[in-house]
Image: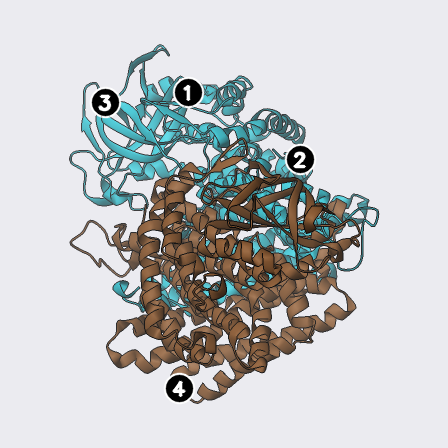
Chain colours: A cyan, B brown
Amino acid sequence: MGQYQPPLRDMQFVLHELLQVEDQLAGMPRHAETNRELIDQIIEEGGKFCAEVIFPLNQVGDNEGCQWNNGEVSTPTGFKEAYRQYCEAGWPSLTCDPDFGGQGLPQVVHNVLYEMLNSSNLSWTMYPGLSHGAYECIHAHGSDELKKDYLPKLVSGEWTGTMCLTEPHCGTDLGILRTKAEPGADGAYLITGTKIFISSGEHDMAENIVHLVLARLPDAPAGTKGISLFAVPKFIPNHDGTLGPRNAAVCGSIEHKMGIHGNSTCVMNFDSAQGWLLGQPHKGLQAMFVMMNAARLGVGMQGLGLTEIAYQNSLAYARERLQSRALTGAKAPDKVADPIIVHPDVRRMLLTQKAYAEAGRAFSYFVALELDRSLDHPDEAARKEADDVLTLLIPIIKAFLTDNAFDCTNLGMQILGGHGFISEWGMEQYVRDARIAQIYEGTNTIQSLDLLARKVLADQGARLKQFGRRIESFVIAHKDDPAMAEFIAPLADLAEKTQKLTMEIGMKGMQNPDEVGAAAVPFMKVAGHLVFAYFWARMARVALEKQDSGDDFYRAKLATARYYFSKLLPETAYWIRVARAGAEPLMALDADLF
Amino acid sequence: MGQYQPPLRDMQFVLHELLQVEDQLAGMPRHAETNRELIDQIIEEGGKFCAEVIFPLNQVGDNEGCQWNNGEVSTPTGFKEAYRQYCEAGWPSLTCDPDFGGQGLPQVVHNVLYEMLNSSNLSWTMYPGLSHGAYECIHAHGSDELKKDYLPKLVSGEWTGTMCLTEPHCGTDLGILRTKAEPGADGAYLITGTKIFISSGEHDMAENIVHLVLARLPDAPAGTKGISLFAVPKFIPNHDGTLGPRNAAVCGSIEHKMGIHGNSTCVMNFDSAQGWLLGQPHKGLQAMFVMMNAARLGVGMQGLGLTEIAYQNSLAYARERLQSRALTGAKAPDKVADPIIVHPDVRRMLLTQKAYAEAGRAFSYFVALELDRSLDHPDEAARKEADDVLTLLIPIIKAFLTDNAFDCTNLGMQILGGHGFISEWGMEQYVRDARIAQIYEGTNTIQSLDLLARKVLADQGARLKQFGRRIESFVIAHKDDPAMAEFIAPLADLAEKTQKLTMEIGMKGMQNPDEVGAAAVPFMKVAGHLVFAYFWARMARVALEKQDSGDDFYRAKLATARYYFSKLLPETAYWIRVARAGAEPLMALDADLF
C-alpha cells in the first residue's frame, strides 16, 4: 500500500525561509497572531492525522468504491469514521469565520493541510473539500437567516456541500443549461432538472448535504446572463438546528469511472426541490465565481498532493529495487545488482517529480498567501494588488499543477515498471486519480483560454506585466551575483520571450480570434514555466545562502534547481514554437475531412 | 461503447501508394503471388471480423476481467467463442510455414491485421499474439520432433503460447533470474521456479498452452550467459496429437491491474515441470531474441491500434457534441451551440492523434515489409540491409509508437471531457490499456538504451547513417521542388541535427557511460521524429501529386502533414536541449539526499 510522510521540512522551507509567512501575516490584523510556532504545530498535527487516519483508507476506497442503493450512497469502509474524527478534531473549521464557529486561520494553512489530505486520499478529501466551497458561497451571498441556519453546520462538518453545474448536454458551456427555478412559497424556489458529475452528491458521511445549484428563473434572459444560484438542502432544516422534511433532490445513480472511486460522482435529480436564492437573480455565475479562485487553487493542490505521493513511493522503490549494474560500474557490489536509483533515466524521472513537487509547493503556498492578502490585508491597494496576482495565477495553478501531476504519477508508474501497473502497489491508482484533475473545475484548455484571453490579453497584458515586474526586480537584485547567474539568465530570458510572445499573440488575435484559441495551451505551458523558473530561482537563492550550513537539505535544493533549469525549463522552446505556428495549421482542414 | 471502422483507405494508401507493397513482394519468390487484390481482400475480411466479432467484446472484457479459480482461469464472456471463430477462419495461420499448415503470407499483412485487432480489443488480441511468438521460436529452435508435435497446433490456434521471462526479483535484469532446469528422463528437463506477469499464462480459450521459459541449467555460468530456453506445455502432448498428462506448470494467481483486464496476467509456478530445450544450452536469450523483433513490432502495433481507435471515437464526439460558439462566430447558428470540432484546441488534439496514427501506420507497415525482406528476399545483401534497418528501427517502433498511443488516448479523453473519465463511454479504457505498452516487452527506457547504446553507438553510427542515406536521397530528389520545400527543409535540418547530436553523445559517452544513459530517452524522441518526419515528407509528396485528383483524401493528408511539421516536430528542439544538458544534472545528487 505504499507510504506517506508529510514533507514537513520542505513545507517549512517554503513557508518560513522562502515566503516569510509569519511576517506576511503580521501585516494582516486578523492573522497577526498566527505565528510560526502555531503554523508548524497545526501542520504537524494535520500531517499526523493524514498519515495515520486518511492515508490508510486510500486503497480501500479505490477497491470498494461507492455503492448506490435506491437513492442512497454508501462510502467505502472507514470513510465515515475518519470523517467523524476529522470533524471532532475541528479540521473543517480551520479558516472559517469565528462568527459561525470557525477558527479564523489563514488560507495558507488550509492549503498546506489540503496538500497533505490530497496526498493521503484524494477521494476522501473531496467530501470536505467541496463543503468548504459551499460554505464560502453561502457566507458571501446567503441571507442572514440562511447563514444562521447553514453556516455553523458546514463549519462543524455536520453537513457537507456540493456544486451542481453540469447537465447532460452542457459542461463547459453553462449558457445553455436548462434546470428551472420557479418561485414557491415563503421565499423559496422550486428547482427542477438533472445535474450530472456531482462530486459528493450523495453519501453517508454527514447528516445533511447542501447542493449549490445553478438554474434559470422563469423570466431569465438566454445565455449566461440568465443563470441564478440556489442552495438546495437534502433535508430542509428547521430554524432550531434540527432537520425537517426530505427535499426532492435525489441521487439517480453514480458513475463508474477511471479513478477517484471512493468519491461518489452522482446524477442528481431535482424534482420541484425547494431551494433558496443566493445572491441576485440572474447573477448566479458571478455568485459562484467568488469561490472559483479557492476551488481552482484547491484542484491545483490535488495535483501537488498526488505529485508528492507519487514521488515518495517511486523514490522508495528506486532505492530498494535491485536491477542491473550502474553504467559506470557496480555501486553495490555486495548485492546481486545495484538499486535502480543509480541509473540516469530513473534519476531523470525522480528529479522531474521532485522539481515539480517542490516548485508546485512554493507556487501554491505563495498563491494561498496572496489569497489571504486579498481577503485580509488592511490596505485596499494591497488587497487589489493581491487580487490581480490571483486573477492571473489561478488558471496556471489549476492547469499547470494538474498536468504536472499526471506526468509525475506516470513517471512513478514507469519507475516501478510492471509493478507500477499492478493495483497492489498503489501507483496506478495515483495515475487514475490524477487524471480527473485535468478535466473538472474547467478543463485545462478552458483554464488556458481563461489565462490568455481574459487574464492576459483583456487588459493588454497589464496583469502579466505587473507580475513580470516582480521577476524583473528579482533579476535586477541578483544579476551581478555570479553564483546566481545560472538561474537568473534563463529566468530573464524566458520573461522577455514571454512578453514578446504575448504581444505577438495579441496582435494576431485582433485580426483572428482563432489565433488566441490556437495559442492558449502552449501559452499556458510557457507561463507555467515562467512562474516555476521564478520560484526555483528564489529557492536557489535561499539555498545558496545556506549551502554551507551543514544541512544537506540546501544541497539537494540546489541540485534540484539545477535539474529544473537544465532539463525541464527548455520545454518552453517547444511551446513557444507551437504558439508561433499559429491557427492556420489547425483550422485548414474542413471538419468533414478529418 | 463507441465505434470502430477499419481505416481501409489509409491502409491502402500506405500499402499501395506509399510503399508499393505489390512491387516489393514481387521481388521475393515466396510472396511473388501476393498481389494487391489478395492483400486488400484479406484486410477487408479481417477488418470485418475485427469490427463485428472482436470489437464488441472489448468493453465486456474490461468490465468482467478474468477469473481465477483454483489454478484455472476463465476469460470474459464471449472471448472463447470469438477465438474459436478466429481459428476456424484460419487467421492464426496467416504468415505461418505451409509445412506446418500455415498460409505463408507476408509479415506486412499480419501487421495490418494486428493493427485492426489491437484497435478492436487489445486484451483479446494478446492471446493469439503471444502464441505467434511461441510459434516463431519453436520454428526457429525446436527439434524436428518438437516442431512436428507443436507447430501444427500453434498454427491452427488449437494451442496458445506464452513467454515466461520475469521473476519477482527480476524483469529488466534477466541475468539474475533463478528458475532452475535439471536434466530429467527422455531428453526432458525438470523446470522449477516462479514466473510473474505472464500474459495469457492460463485461460480457457485453447486446449493446451505452451510456455517458453527461461531457466538455468545446473552447470550454467552466472549472468545472462547462463540462461537456457525451454518449451513447457500445460499438457504434455503425445506424438499422435492427443494430450497426455497435466504438467506441473500451474497458475498461482492472476494480477489486478490498471488495464488489459480481459487478458490474464499470471503468476506461474513451475514445480519440476517437464520442459524441452530450445536452441543451445546457455543460449536461451539469443534463442528468444529471434522473436524479439516481431514481438516489439507487435507492441508498436498495439500503440498504433489504440491511437487509431482513440482518434475515431474522439472525432465522432467532437463532431456531435455541441458546446460554446466558435471564436470567429457561430458555425451552426441553427443549433444551441457549435460542434466542438470548431474550437482550435480540440482540433489540436484531433490532429495530433491523426498525425501520429497515420505516421505510425506508414512507419510500422514499412518496418513489417523490411521484416519480410529480411526473411524472404533472395539476395543476401538485401536481407542483410533489411536486417540492419530493422535492428535500428525496432526499438523506435516499440517506444515511440507506445508513447504516442498513451498521449493520444489521453487526448481522446480530454476531448470527451468528463465523459472521457466515465467508463460508459469507453475512452478511459483505452488510456488504461495503452499504459502497459510503455512498460512490457522492455520498458521504453530500455528501448531507448538499446537504440542509442547498442544500435547506434556500438557501430559508430553506421546503421543510423545507412538509414540517414535514405533520407538524404529523398531530400536530394525533392529539394528543388518548391511545393516540397516546407517538408524537405525541416526534415533535412533534423537529419543533420540528429547526426551531430549522435556524434556529441558518442564522444561524451566514451568519457563517461552515464552520458549515454542520460541521453537515451531524449535521443529516442529525436530519432522517432526523424523517422516520422521522413514518412510525413514521403506521404506529402504522394499527396501533392494527387491533390488535384478530386479525392479529398489527399487534401486531408497534406493538411495533416503540415500540422505535423509545424506543431509536433518542433518538440525535437526541446529533446535536443535535454540530451545536450548531459548527465551532470542527473547524477549530482547523492541517492540519500533525494
Q: Residue furthest right?
A: A334
Q: Which mark is residue A188?
A: 3
Q: Which amino acid does the dot numbered 3 rest on?
A: Ala
Question: Is residue B7 at least partly visible in the picture?
Answer: yes
Q: Residues within 10 Å of mark 4 (few under 14, many from 20)?
A: few
Where does residue A426 sit, x and y in percent of width and height? 57, 37
Distance from disc 2 to disc 1, alpha carbons, whole Å, reads 33 Å
Q: Residues within 10 Å of mark 1 (few under 14, many from 20)?
A: some
Mark 3 or 4: in front is 4
Q: Going by the image, does A579 lie left or right of A340?
A: left
Q: Going by the image, does B334 lie left or right of A49?
A: left
Distance from disc 4 to disc 2, alpha carbons, whole Å, reads 61 Å
| Label located before the other in sequence (2 or 3) | 2
Secondary structure under the numbered disc 1 in the rendered image: loop
Q: Chain of mark 4?
A: B
Q: Which mark is residue B482?
A: 4
Q: Residue furthest front?
A: B240
Q: Which mark is residue A8?
A: 2
Q: Which mark is residue A204?
A: 1
Q: Chain of mark 3?
A: A
Q: Residues at marks 2 and 1, common chain?
A: yes
